[in-house]
Amino acid sequence: MKQRLAASLILGSFVFGLNACDSPSALLISQNGNSQPLTLRANLQAAASALQVATLTITEVDKLPTPLRTAGLIEIIYDTSKSRIPGTRNSDGSLTFPFRSSRPISGDGSLPVILVGDRGLSYPVQLETGSELALNSPGILISPTNNVTVGSNLQLKANFKQAESASNYDFTWSYAASQVGPWQAISGNTSEVRMDATRIGNYYLRLEMRNRQSQSVSSYITPSALLRVQDSDRLALTTPASGVVLEGERIELEANLPEYDKLENLRYLWSYSASLQGNFAPISEEGKKISWETPRAGSYYLRLQVLTQTGNATYTSSKTLVQVAQADSVIQTTPPTGSLVRGDAVTLKSTLAASPDLSYTWFYGFSPQGSFTPIPGSGSSVNWTPNLTGDFYLRLRTFDAKTNQSRTYTSSKSLVSVRDSDSVFSTSPAPASLLKGDSVQLTLNQSNVENVIWSYASTAQGPFLPIPATGKSVNWSPAAPGSYYLKAEAPRSDGSLATWISANSMVTVADRGDAISTEPALGQLQLGQAVSLRSSVKLTNARYSWSYASNATGPFTPVPSLESQPLSTVTWYPTQSGSYYIKLDINDPQSRSSVSFTSEQALVQVQEAQPFFTSDPSSGRVKSSDHILIKARFDSGGRAFNYGWAYSTGAAGPFTPLGGSTLPEYFWNQPLKTQGSYYVRFTATPPGSDRSLSYFSQVPLLFVSSSDAGSPEFGTVTR
């Protein structure tokens, strides 16, 4: 009895000694006289989410003492809290316990616990959760280095003593800021994986190894935070060191990533953005060290992409590393306000220190971010005549031939404002409210310009159509009704083209209902009568061209007037019956312009109520030896005419002259007339004129037979 009590006291002393350190303690009575704790393998299963707990599974149950192995209830004590956590027997005989402990598993994977059977028996047990595979020190290798910048792409590799022994295992990688988690998964299931360092901090690494045959799981956790990720705010060194430059100046950028110092064949790609959330614009220069021509004024974040043979890494500064100040003071304008009327010139001058090695190129644009258009001329001072309206930003690019460097300066605000103005134009009459066919005098109120080219449009944006006349002051007859903007262009002495456009429409043209009139009104005529065509448009030295057609769209045929030259009033003898639309084209040689009018309805109505041609005898039938009287119902209107007569066997001729007369009738007394049916042509010609009127019978009028045929009575019937 005394010996048993001594053994129990010795075991109790062992357990108390364990409690005094950092090992668990609960029950102090053990049936086991062995003071050395059991060593068993256990599989640690990490929690899949924050709502789950990790588990420990003891697979070597057969090594437990018989009283513990056969106990109905087995509990585990992890730490000094003495909390007993019941386990679960699995179908394969293994024991699984929830892993809830404030004390982490040691770096080598060992965990001292106490197993309690049926609440009466306690056994100290050393659980080995570490790697089943032997690892060198350090157990995990990091490439390119343990100290990296956020954004780095890393290679993690298990440092096995015997790498070939790992072929039967699957691997799970994770990292955490604490040795007890929570753990973040790393993609990949081999002994060598890649990861992106996306968060600043110091991290432990964990490697779980699952044997494919036994399905046993062991893990390795680095004994200290092996991976150290620093911020990217110093990813680049700048020259000047402050990172502040004037807009248009260059700044030197050098990659500051120590993890790549010993690597070769790297490619560095740079980009920038005014916002971390915005799109990063690429910088054209490449390399570890570059010279960058800064964009417009602002503060910029930098992004650096490093391309290696094993992978790519992207680094983005969390704060702005480059500050670009405005360059407005580099460019001066005359006038100082930069406010112009389109067509005027502005002087642009650089305030940079003069140097014979500098060349200057000037540009303008509608926004500091948009595309810029070259301005003609070079030098530190240029004269510019904008041909567009708007508010313009200016850009100056200099090139130093000595240093072979260029700089670009862009204004942060518009320095030149161009507007259209009506004041550059004068019209006579003023205001220029015209009727179609009237002319207006246009004058450009600018000095030192002569060769002015004019055009007009219905809107200020065009399209502009040419006005034929050129010069500082011109006459123009608008061809159509409407309201028109004016445009004038003239070359300057420096070779530039000045352009002026009115801000508002300056010429208004109304349609003209009385442009064409007739006498008699509405042109009610009989064939053979004349109609007078008149125009209310009176232009000196203008040429009037009259034409007619049977419909409003034509084709139009010139009116055969008797006047020697086209006038605003003409006399027209229509030679065929019908209804006719009238068209008038007026060409003004002074303004080199033309205008056209077309009647909206048929203004001339020509009827043939009675036949134009008659004969006596009325049947027109005579013998070859008889005579016949031919008459034309022609109204001379008191005008003098010489009349001519001809006949033909066909309506289209050729016609054979019969003779002339002073009256619109002809007595044909030619003996031995040729037998046949004949058409008749009647011609009226003013004395001394080369213009004549011709009328043709639509059907045969004369019928000549042999002398043996019966002869009708002469003068008995008139058709």
Image (cartoon, rainbow, N blue to C red):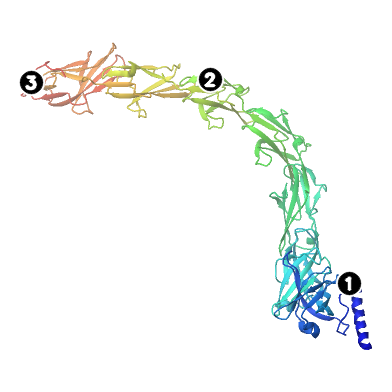
Q: Disc 2 or disc 1, which is closer to the eye? A: 1
Q: Front-most of 604 and 116?
A: 116
**Residue type for callout 3:** Ser
- Give the percent coordinates (x, y) of residue 328: 75, 36
Circle 2 is placed at which residue position? 432
Question: In the rendered structure, which amino acid carries the disc numbered 2?
Answer: Ala
Q: Which mark is residue 299?
A: none
Looking at the image, is mark 3 or mark 2 nearer the viewer? 2
State the CA–CA distance, disc 3 to disc 1.
161 Å
Residue 384 horizontal/vertical position (percent): 66, 32
| Residue 184 image position (x, y, % from top left) | 74, 64
In this rendering, the answer to whether 615 lies above or below 16 is: above
Quarter of the image for residue 41 reads bottom right
Label 2 sits on a secondary structure element that is: strand
SS assignment at label 3 = loop
Quarter of the rendering occupied by the C terminus: top left
Please tell me how crowded label 3 is: few (under 14), some (14-19), or many (20+) other residues with Cα within 10 Å: some
Find residue 22 and name its label.
1
Does residue 518 appear in this view? yes
Can you tell which mark lies on residue 711?
Answer: 3
Amino acid type of the residue tagged 1 in the rendering: Asp
User: Left of 18 or right of it: where is 136?
Assistant: left
Query: Which residue is at a point 45% across and 24% down the rendered structure image?
Result: 594
- Within 10 Å of disc 2 (Cα), the crowding (few <14, some 14-19, many 20+) is many
> Are the residues tagged 3 and 2 within 8 Å (C-beta)?
no
Q: Is residue 76 left or right of residue 623?
A: right
- Taking the image as shown, residue 15 lies to the left or right of residue 648, namely right
User: Residue 133: in sight, yes or no?
Assistant: no
Neighbours of disc 1 within 10 Å: few (<14), some (14-19), many (20+) = few
Q: Specify which label sits upstream in the sequence, 3 or 2.
A: 2
Alpha-carbon span between mark 3 and mark 2: 75 Å
